[in-house]
Image (cartoon, rainbow, N blue to C red):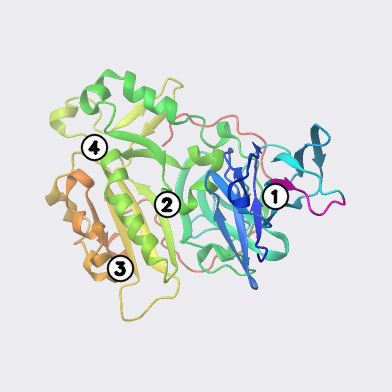
């Protein structure tokens, strides 16, 4: 059987059970950060994410990559051994995992990366569009001679601990010296050590507790109307968020999150099989309570946390979609606008624009297009960019290639961060 070389990157801290059936080995890959698989196909290398179990047939090999080195449990030594190399190979041989590049081919029962499990995040010296004055953060990794892969970029206001918008290309998996799409111009320039208290010092547990314990919120919405979840819901990008997904999270209308937003992402995933699309995602506005409910209270819907922070509930969630290689004969740039409010009426939807989903070929017959006007799935619509770019907060109006900038050294820890954030 021809050997298939596969590279697994990331943390793998597992025991490796062996099965005699079918002469194969099964590797559990449950860990804080799922391993990435880089498969070689001729001169090309592609990136994918492992499932909970990676299965190798007899004689197959995997090349492992850990930035900080490896830790193996060697059967014959009956102990763990550490290796400072960042790349090595293990093979499945007669239902046993071995290290074939060592003379005695030692059997291994467990392997993990040395150090902490962190997702790589960098600051780019080149700003994202309309992100001057904020941090342009890039989640990505360089794979030595194979090239690099940038998963997504984040325009972030570190002073206010506030997400501006997120950019990615749906969906890049090939390792290339030049990456197709909008992330190519951004660099992996300055490594950023993520610290939750600097970026967003609260998480889903405190937000969910507020909805559960606040009698006013509970009487209005119960505990199932809203959900605190990451703005990036695309399955191909889920593994790249790691422990900093809290800084990407917002309060979603649950019906929208599990309904029409999911339908939109499914349509985008299908369309990206034959084309690449640059996507920018953000939020705008704050939900206003009807006057019959708000009375003399503030009409802005927000959640007060025990820690003193205030989390507002966005009124709109938007996604700008633009074809990397546009076709002049069809609509290849538009904005999806999803209404995050349970109070919106169907006739109020057209105040932003007249929905034009039917103009987008890959959306025309999609489930999203058919259900966009049904509140039970979350109201949504499609708009021309010109109709809404000045109505949406944090929308990147400048799409020209930005100028590089000389970044000063990273400042010391921020001690005077405002506790009124979104």
Q: Is residue 202 left or right of residue 20?
A: left
Q: Is residue 415 magenta?
A: no
Q: Which dot marks residue 94?
A: 1
The magenta region covers 96-103
Q: Which dot marks residue 288?
A: 4
Which badge, 1 or 2, comes first in the chain's sequence?
1
Q: Nearer the viewer, mark 1 or mark 4?
A: 1
Q: Is residue 394 visible in the rendered structure shown here?
A: no
Q: CA distance from mark 3 to mark 1?
A: 48 Å
Q: CA distance from mark 1 to mark 2?
A: 38 Å
Q: Nearer the viewer, mark 3 or mark 4?
A: 3
Q: Secondary structure at mark 4?
A: loop
**Main structural element of the magenta stretch: helix, strand or loop?**
loop
Closer to us: 275 or 249: 275
Q: Residues within 10 Å of mark 3 (few under 14, many from 20)?
A: some
Query: Who's the residue at 35% across and 28% down the image?
Result: 303
Residue of label 3:
362
Q: CA distance from mark 1 to mark 4?
A: 64 Å
For residue 177, above or below residue 314: below
Q: CA distance from mark 2 to mark 3?
A: 17 Å
Q: Nearer the viewer, mark 4 or mark 2?
A: 2
Q: Secondary structure at mark 3?
A: helix
Q: Which dot marks residue 234?
A: 2
Image coords of residue 367 (percent x, y): 24, 58
Q: Residues within 10 Å of mark 1 (few under 14, many from 20)?
A: some
Q: CA distance from mark 3 to mark 4?
A: 33 Å
């Amino acid at each position: 059987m021809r050997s298939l070389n596969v590279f697994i990157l990331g943390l793998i801290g597992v025991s490796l059970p062996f099965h005699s059936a079918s002469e194969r080995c099964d590797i559990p890959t449950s860990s804080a950060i799922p391993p990435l698989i880089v498969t070689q196909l001729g001169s090309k290398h592609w990136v994918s994410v492992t499932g909970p179990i990676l299965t190798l047939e007899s004689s197959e090999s995997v090349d492992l990559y850990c930035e900080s080195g490896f830790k193996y449990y060697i059967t014959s030594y009956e102990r763990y051994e550490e290796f400072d190399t960042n790349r090595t190979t293990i093979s499945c041989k007669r239902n046993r995992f071995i290290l074939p590049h060592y003379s005695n081919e030692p059997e291994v029962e467990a392997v993990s990366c040395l150090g902490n499990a962190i997702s790589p995040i960098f600051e780019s010296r080149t700003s994202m569009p309309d992100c001057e004055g904020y941090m342009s953060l890039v989640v990505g990794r360089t794979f030595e001679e194979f090239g690099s892969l940038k998963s997504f970029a984040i325009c972030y206001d570190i002073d206010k601990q506030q997400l501006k918008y997120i950019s990615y290309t749906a969906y890049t998996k090939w390792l290339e010296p030049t990456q197709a799409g909008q992330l190519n111009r951004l660099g992996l320039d300055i490594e950023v050590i993520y610290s939750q208290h600097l970026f967003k010092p609260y998480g889903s547990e405190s937000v969910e507790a507020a909805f559960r314990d606040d009698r006013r919120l509970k009487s209005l919405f119960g505990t199932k109307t809203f959900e605190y979840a990451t703005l990036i819901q695309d399955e191909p990008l889920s593994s790249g968020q790691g422990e900093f997904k809290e800084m990407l999270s917002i309060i979603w209308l649950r019906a929208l999150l599990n309904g029409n937003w999911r339908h939109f992402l499914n349509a985008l995933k299908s369309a990206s099989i034959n084309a690449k699309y640059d996507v920018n995602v953000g939020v705008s506005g704050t939900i206003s309570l009807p006057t019959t409910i708000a009375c003399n209270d503030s009409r802005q819907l927000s959640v007060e946390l025990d820690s003193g922070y205030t989390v507002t509930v966005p009124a709109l969630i938007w996604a700008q979609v633009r074809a990397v290689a546009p076709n002049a004969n069809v609509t290849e740039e538009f904005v999806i606008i999803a209404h995050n409010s349970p109070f919106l009426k169907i006739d109020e939807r057209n105040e932003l624009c007249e929905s034009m989903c039917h103009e987008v070929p890959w959306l025309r017959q999609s489930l999203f297009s058919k259900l966009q006007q049904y509140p039970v799935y979350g109201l949504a619509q499609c708009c021309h960019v010109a109709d809404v770019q000045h109505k949406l907060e944090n929308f990147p109006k400048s799409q020209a290639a930005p100028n590089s900038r000389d970044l000063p050294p990273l400042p010391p820890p921020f001690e005077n961060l405002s506790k009124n954030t979104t």
